[in-house]
Amino acid sequence: MKRSDIAIFTKIPTLKTERLTMRALTVADAADMFEYSCGTAVPKYLLWSPHKDIFVTRSHLRYLRTQYAAGEYYDWALVLTEENKMIGTCGFSHFDLDNDSAEVGYVLNDKYWGKGYATEAVRRIVEFAFDCLPLNRLSLRILDGNDASVRVAERCGFRREGTHIDALLVKGHYVTYHDYALLRDEYINRR
C-alpha cells in the first residue's frame, strides 16, 4: 500500500452507524472530550494521563486538526446522532504501509460504557478498513485487565494472538498488553 492509497484521510470521510455519526474532530468538541478525559476511569487503560483542564483538551484538538490536514491522523469523533453529543473516538492509531496493516484504537466516555457504542464503532471501522482501503490486517493492543475492551474486540471478530509482559512503561509503571488481530479473509468469511 502506498501513501497515496490513504490520501482519503486528508479529508476524513463521515461514516454512519445505526446510532452514531463518525466525523472529524473539531475544537468545538472540547467540552465533550474534556468530560471523559479529565477523570481517571477512561485513561486507566490508555497511554495518556487525564487532562488537567479544558485548555489542555482544546490545545490537543487544535493539534489534531493540523494532523488531519497533513494526513497524519486517522480518528473519528463518535457522535450520538440523535443528541449531537461527542462521546469518544475510534479509528486507526497506526498504519504499517509496507505490510498493508493498521492498528485500531478507540476511547469512549465512561457514562456510555456497556451500551454497545464501542462495538458499533469498531465494526464500522473494520468495514471501512476492508471495504474501502487495501488493508490485509487490523490489530488492537489491549492493556491487561481491560476486560470490556477484550469483549469489544472479540465481538468484532478479532482473535488474541499474544501477550507482551511488562512491555510498556505507562505513567511510571510497566504494563502488560495483549495483541488481537483480524485478517481480511476472516472478515470476508464472516459476512
Image (cartoon, grey):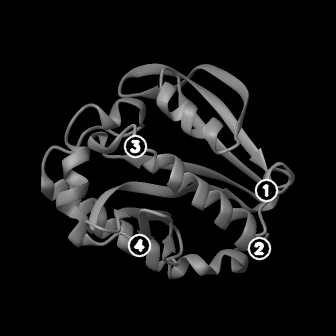
> Mark 4 packing: few (<14 Cα in 10 Å), some, or many (20+)?
many
Which quadrant would the C terminus be assigned to in this image?
A: bottom right
Depth-wise, is mark 2 or mark 4 nearer the camera?
4
Mark closer to the chain start, 1 or 2: 2
* Residue 48 in picture, x, y percent from top left: 36, 40
The residue that appears at 44% across and 50% down in the rendered structure is: 117
Mark closer to the chain start, 3 or 1: 3
The residue that appears at 67% across and 22% down in the rendered structure is: 163
Q: Nearer the viewer, residue 132 or 101?
A: 132
> Mark 1 packing: few (<14 Cα in 10 Å), some, or many (20+)?
few
Whole-Å distance between the Cαs marked 2 and 3?
37 Å
Depth-wise, is mark 2 or mark 3 nearer the camera?
3
Give the residue number, with chain letter if any, for mark 2. Answer: 2
* Residue 42 in picture, x, y percent from top left: 32, 37
Left or right, 49 with respect to 45, comes to left
Q: Secondary structure at mark 2?
A: loop
Pointers 2 and 4 in contact (C-beta within 8 Å):
no
Give the residue number, with chain letter if any, for mark 3. Answer: 115
Which quadrant would the N terminus be assigned to in this image?
A: bottom right
Left or right, 155 with respect to 50, comes to right
Amino acid at circle 4: Ala
Asked if 98 appears above or below 39 in the picture, the reply is below
The residue that appears at 45% across and 74% down in the rendered structure is: 68
Amino acid at circle 2: Lys
Amino acid at circle 1: Arg
Which label was assigned to residue 191?
Answer: 1
Give the residue number, with chain letter if any, for mark 4. Answer: 24
Q: Secondary structure at mark 4?
A: loop
Asked if 110 appears above or below 132 in the picture, the reply is above
Pointers 2 and 3 in contact (C-beta within 8 Å):
no
